[in-house]
Amino acid sequence: MTYLAGEARRELLDTVAAAIAHLAAALADLGAAYELLDERAADRLEDELFGPVQHAYGRARRTHTGFAGRAGLAEETFPAAAGEGPAGGTTARELLQRAMEGVARADMTLSALQDSMAPVEVGDPELRRGLAEVRELLGPLPGRAREFVRVLGR
């Protein structure tokens, strides 16, 4: 049984790591979009989207690291959430759309994990709380992004 429990914990961590990777990609896209915007729009982007995604990314990493430590598993090293900048011809709108797709993937990944009951089965309330907090941070972002794009350039 110990092998199965350890394997289940590792799979759970791998799933959280996948969500973290989606958030890192979203941050990179938001950073690239920031570079394409005027100062006023860039400040709004930072406040309304980049900051909350960065907060969710950090909370997800802390959740992963904390659970790995409590479960006696090796912690992952996550690369910094940085991009290469916008590719030629890529618009801020396209980057924002791609970022929100990454946010949606992260949220779906964590939702499926929570629905699987694996976080309950491993008996770790801090893990469950961390996952819920990340999802709460991600929840309002698609609406904020739609509003941001709606008024972009006005």
Image (cartoon, rainbow, N blue to C red):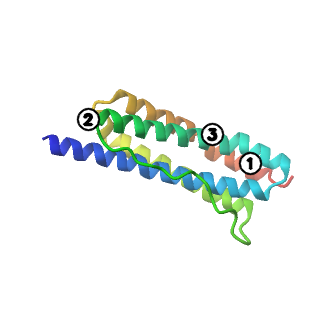
Name the spot of residue 72 as percent of width and height, x first: 28, 37
Which amino acid does the dot numbered 1 rest on?
A: Phe
Q: Quadrant of residue 120?
A: top left
Disc 1 on helix, strand or loop? helix
* Image point (43%, 30%), residue name: 129
Q: Secondary structure at mark 3?
A: helix
**Camera-nearest residue between 137 and 70:** 70
Q: Position of residue 34 (x, y in %)?
A: 74, 53
Measure how far apart labels 1 and 2 are at the Cα level.
40 Å
User: In x, y percent, where is residue 101?
Assistant: 57, 56
Report how many numbered discs are placed on residues in the image.
3
Query: Which residue is more in the foreground, 56 or 117?
Result: 56
What amino acid is at disc 2? Glu
Report the disc number at residue 52.
3
Element on which disc 2 rests: helix
Q: Nearer the viewer, residue 54 or 90?
A: 54
Mark 3 → mark 2, Cα distance in angstroms: 29 Å
